[in-house]
Image (cartoon, grey):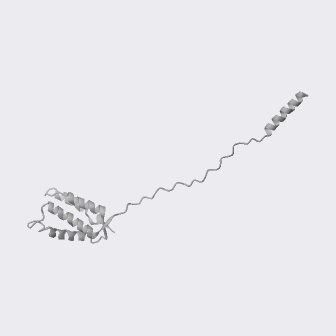
Amino acid sequence: MMQVCRAALLGAVALMSACVVRESAPAPPPPAYTPPPPPPPVMTPAAIVTVTTAEASLSLSEAQCNHEAKCNRIGPTQRYADWNHCQNIARQAADQKFSNCRHVRQAELTNCLNEITAETCGFLSEPLDSFERAYACRGPALCYD
């Protein structure tokens, strides 16, 4: 009988172990909501710095007359009788250049003034320098409305 009890006991243990609900590790919680990454920033041009047409005319006429003085074109027997004569003529030309502008772009004006300052004096080099200056100092490139 011991054998029968032992077999019954083993069978009961086996049955119980098969019926025991095994606790498994809890399912991981769903991931927390992660918003999508923000869109890339919209690229906008940097702010355009402008100056008034009066300031631009003054700067342009001063640069032009400085160039004329460097090339010895100001004096009683030269193209301009004196500094004031050069300033008056150059200022009129600059005012005319900016007559259709409300503002002048600072960066382009600076480029124009640099071209005037870099111009050389002399019969052979001056036409090419003047062409480069004319391109850098053209009205539409300088105006900002």
Residue extending farthest left: 77
Residue at x 89% of width, y 28% of height: 2
Q: Position of residue 91 (x, y in %)?
A: 21, 69
Task: Kindly identify the residue that appears in the image at 24 percent across and 61 percent down.
Answer: 113
**Residue 125 in which image quadrant:** bottom left
Give how far across and how far down residue 102 sits, in percent.
31, 71
Which quarter of the rendered picture does the N terminus lie within? top right
Picture quarter with the C terminus: bottom left
Residue sitting at x 79%, y 38%? 18
Q: Of residues 98 and 33, which is closer to you in this image?
A: 33
Q: Is residue 60 above or below residue 13?
A: below
Q: Residue furthest front?
A: 2
x and y percentages locating residue 120 in the rendered image: 17, 57
Q: Nearer the viewer, residue 16 or 126?
A: 16
**Residue name at image x 33 percent, y 64 percent:** 49
- Quadrant location of residue 105? bottom left
Residue 97 against residue 117 in the figure, above or below:
below
The location of residue 10, given as percent across then percent down, is 83, 32
Q: Quadrant of residue 123?
A: bottom left
**Total number of numbered labels?**
0
Q: Residue furthest right?
A: 1
